[in-house]
Image (spheres, rainbow, N blue to C red):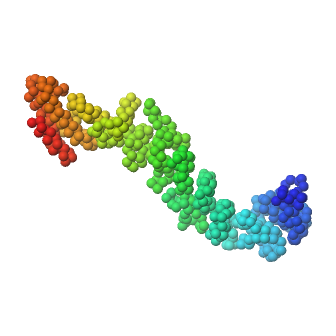
Amino acid sequence: MVYENLYKAKRGGKPGTYSLIRSFLNVKHPTPMRGEDGLLEGQPIWSMIYYCLRCGDLNAVQEVISKASQQLRDFPDIMLEYIKNDRCLGPSTLTKVRHFYRRTVKNSTDPYKRAVYSVISQSDPLEAHSEIADKTEDYLWLKLCQIQFESDPLAPDQFTLQKLQSLLYEEYGESHFSAYQQPYLYFQVLFLTAQFEAALEFLSRIDVLRCHAVHLGLVLYELKLLLLPSSTQATLLTRDPADPTPQCRLNFARLIMMYTRKFEATDPREALQYFFFLRDLKSSSGENLFMSCVTELVLETKEFEMMLGKLDQNGMRRPGAIDKFQANSEKIIELVAKNTEEKGLFEEAVKLYDLAHSHEKVLSLLNQLLSSVVSQPSLPQSNRERLRTMALDIAKRYQSLGHDATQDSTNTFYLMLDLMTFFDQFHNGDISSALQIVQNLKVIPLNVDRVKSSLTSFNYFSDEVRKCLPDILLATMNILNAIYKQTKKSFPQSPGPIKIIDGGQEASLNAIRSQAKALIMFVGMLPYRLPGDTNARLVQLEVQLN
């Protein structure tokens, strides 16, 4: 206003608040208003004092009262005490000034004088001073100046911050301030009266302003100026019955997650930056909320390597995006792996546990996965081929670099790999090699004398191996059947691992029958329930040998 009207303002070349206020009043009131206690340089004294106070420049106030001290009687002494005591008056002075305000100043025709006395004595807080405080910002300044922070037992109706907050938030509210038409104004009203939670919640309701709510919230949260609910599952804005009215609590975690939801799938690295602020909060299950959010983010985006890192050929983990935050990366990876496993994504869980060096979990899950595909034919790009490649890579790495998995899991793992080789040979038609492998593995007996020892060994097999047993038995019986037919056709050629007794065809066929008999005896004594048709098919195949 001043610099747009320099002629009227008569700004001159003197810097400082005093000169600026005088110039401002020259423009605002070209014809000086009538004010009590006279004029100073052509403007009412009290308007000069008020605007210097309004600017927060107490030195400028002193300059005014020093130039007009004779017209202000004892006010200069009152103001000097106010300035020296950090904008407070001593009890005795305060009592005198309040009494003077009620008796004399309140009825004054000078609105600026009433406002100045009301501010320094914190009197008449319900007076709006609308003649001069015609803007919300001016009104807020007046009310904030009148707040009494120290309780006064002799003044039960003192004006507190809580009363101002209730007045603005509950009595006036959004409709009074036309909040959605003037969102910045309503936000300012709440924010300047320390109602940070309600202010941020209001901003977050408006899409284009939600980012401001989030970033202001981050600052306030780091400064420990936000009141949070006891549960991160609470709604965005809640009230605790134990809190004074109108105090609210903001679910900061929900605010962050509402904001990141729009871009976390396309820009997970950016979402991580926000989730890191949740590191000191706990989820409903008691987990670190940062870790929980990272887990959900990784599972949603499937960006395992980018987010969590990957293993190199030497078994060392290359850093991922989470390592930037100097967090417990291995613990985060384990948590992601655990949640991945709980969702039934076992193949991904194997990779994650491997990344976290949880070797026991790697082999335990991998054994489960392999047992479900071990007997299938190996086709390009099939689940079996993919799992086989992964398993061989892990086996090679664990053999060269070592691991801390249990002996039982390790034995099962390598047995699974051998069984995959057995079934590969079987499906490829290399029945001699397949039979040799199953003989060496000693999972099932191919000799009547070994039935009891095989039954004893069965008790030590894991569930994953037992699950494969029906297919192993059927494949082996089919191999014996095929060798039996070959022997009948190609005698006197030896069928490989079969011992030809006395060099005769019948002895060779009897040896095959004996092996089949061992399998049937084993199945009959097995303390394990095989699928319904397995026994029937085995018996049918054995009958063909007789």
- Residue sitting at x 52%, y 61%: 235
Q: Quadrant of residue 480?
A: top left
- Residue sitting at x 58%, y 63%: 248
- Residue sitting at x 33%, y 42%: 369
Residue 19 placement (x, y as % from top left): 87, 57
* 168 vs 452: above or below: below
Residue 91 or residue 467, whichever sits in front: 467
* 84 vs 178: above or below: above
Q: Quadrant of the N terminus?
A: bottom right
Residue 519 or residue 218, whichever sits in front: 519
Q: Quadrant of residue 120?
A: bottom right
Residue 340 placement (x, y as % from top left): 41, 47
Residue 73 placement (x, y as % from top left): 88, 68
- Is 70 positioned to the left or the right of 359 in the image? right
- Is 10 positioned to the left or the right of 188 in the image? right
- Is 195 positioned to the left or the right of 284 in the image? right
Residue 464 or residue 361, whichever sits in front: 464
- Residue sitting at x 78%, y 68%: 132
Residue 192 or residue 88, whichever sits in front: 192
- Is 263 positioned to the left or the right of 351 in the image? right
Q: Quadrant of the C terminus?
A: top left
Q: Is residue 72 visible?
A: no
Residue 366 placement (x, y as % from top left): 35, 40
Q: Quadrant of residue 134?
A: bottom right
